[in-house]
Structures are given as C-alpha cells and as structure tokens.
Image: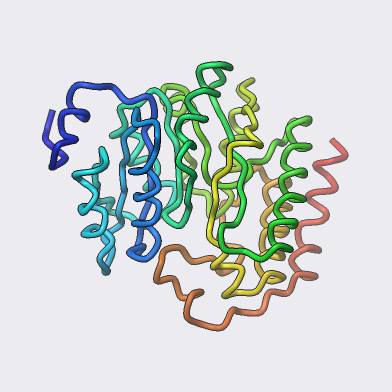
Amino acid sequence: MRKVMKGKNVIIGYYMKPKISIIIPALNEEQFLPKLLQNLADQSEKNFEVIVVDAHSEDQTCKKAESFHDTLNVRIIQADRRHLAYQRNVGAKEAKGEYLLFLDSDMQVEKDFISKLIASIESSKYLMFLPRHMPHDGTPPDEVLYRVLSSFVEMSHLGQKPFAYGPGAVIHRQFFHALGGYDEEVFVYEDHEIVQRAKKRGVSAKLLPRTKIYFSFRRFKKEGRITVLSKYLVATMHLLAKGKVDKEIFTYEMGGSAKYLMEQPLYLDLTQEVKKYFDKLKKLLEE
C-alpha cells in the first residue's frame, strides 16, 4: 500500500478500515473546503476517512486541505478531468470504507453528523441513504423553500422516479460499484439519476429527514433565485422525459472560481425550454 498521508493519522489509514469514506470533489474551493474539513475534524465519531479529489485547482485548495493532515484522516488525489461525476468516481475507486458519502466542497455538517449516519446504517442496513439538505447561508424564506422541496423529494419516493435531496448521498461501496458509479455523461442531476437507477435495480434509498447537510446558497444569490429554480425545473423535466440530463441544456459552471460567481447571469427563456420538454414529459406520464 502506498503512503498517501502525513502526520499522526497515518496509522488510522493503514490499519483500520473506516466505516465511511467521505469523497469531496474540489476545484478552486480554498474559501469553502476548509470549513467543511474543520466540521469533519470536529466530529464526535472518528470512524471515517476523507478523500479530496482535486481537479488541478489554481488557488490554495490543496494547500488548505493538506493543513488538516494532523487532525483528519485525509487523502488528496488529483483528477485529470474537471467533472463532478468523474471526480466522485475517482474518489470511490480509492475508498476503503464500507459506505461512501459524497459531499460538495461548500457543504457543512454538525458535530454529530457522522455518529447519526452510522447509527442509521447500523439500525436499518439499507444500501443507500439520503440526508436532508438545508441552506446554511440562506434567508428564512430560503429555508421554507427547501422544506417544500424536501416534501416533494419525499413524495417522489412513493413512485418509480425518486429524487434525491441533492448532493450528499450515502451508498454502500460494493453496491455503488455494482451500479457502475455516477454516470459521467450526465451534465447535471447526477444525484437524482443514480437514485433512479438504483430504484430500477430494486434498491430504494432510506430518507434521513432529521440528519441534515447544510449547503451554500451562493449560486442562488449570484444568479438569482428565479433563474436557478428555472434551470432546476427544466432539468427536472428533462430527467423525467429522458432518464438523465445528458447534454448541456443551460449554463451551469462548477468550482469556486466559476464565472457565475463573478459575472451577470445569462437570460434563460423558461417558457421556451418548458415547451421543448413538455411533450416528452406528457408522453412519459401517459405510458
């Protein structure tokens, strides 16, 4: 086994098989990633490893992650492609844990998050778990909005087209590889796609509405809430009609230095986009 860490936690990485491997894709996330890593270092339950899959960031992302070597069982891997699903799959191949937890760099968790997660795993033995999402920097109306969206997600699991709360899925490692990992041809909504693919295989996800992951509302603030929600609606219709969003149907950049953080958003003609996919959706629902 090659040495991939520094500091006192090397012993953990060599001799203990972690219960959970936390995989974090990163691209120019020097501002947000350290906050998440500090959250993980502060966990009451330590039976996990962290794998940061960096896509050759141009900022101090890797240096910031390396500063946690003495307080966190963390590895940093370089991916040769800047693509969320690809980076997640790269991390999954390196993971040693029984379960894989996929977090985004701008997320945050409470100190008992891992302990709650392991308790759920031990008590129910599901192959897939979905913690609930809430914005950590939104307004009270934003929190209400996400409670409504969460209700939609929970209702969707009564049917054959279940949705995820968002990024943050917890998947048994062997089952993840049996599924073939995340679909690297997907443009957006790879989280929903893999949940629906699992459902086709007869595996339902266990919803964890009381175990929360907090995410950044930065995209909503920069692009505008209506613009982002419009894009999500279009993507949802495309997913229902085709099974996955396999082409770039709107502008949606990734990473901490994405242009959406610095430039004015492009106008999205929601009416035109909705009409484009309405017939496909109608046909799907009538089958």
How far across and how far down the image is residue 70, in percent? 19, 44
Q: Residue at x 52, y 22 (%)?
A: 121
Residue 183, compared with residue 157, is above or below; it is: below
Q: Residue at x 67, y 40 (%)?
A: 163
Q: Residue extending furthest right?
A: 286
How far across and how far down the image is residue 79, in percent? 28, 51
How far across and how far down the image is residue 126, in percent? 56, 20
Location of residue 273 by image quarter: bottom right
Quarter of the image with the N terminus is top left
User: Observer-nearest residue: 136 or 57?
Assistant: 136
Q: Residue extending furthest bottom?
A: 264
Count of all numbered marks drawn on residues in the image: 0
User: Observer-nearest residue: 24 or 6?
Assistant: 6
User: Observer-nearest residue: 14 or 282?
Assistant: 14
Residue 248, compared with residue 263, is above or below; it is: above
Q: Residue at x 72, y 58 (%)?
A: 233
Left or right, residue 187 beside residue 43: right
User: Observer-nearest residue: 243 or 190?
Assistant: 190
How far across and how far down the image is residue 17, in percent? 28, 22
Q: Residue at x 59, y 79 (%)?
A: 265
Location of residue 125 by image quarter: top right
Left or right, residue 183 beside residue 15: right
Location of residue 232 by image quarter: bottom right
Left or right, residue 196 beside residue 278: left
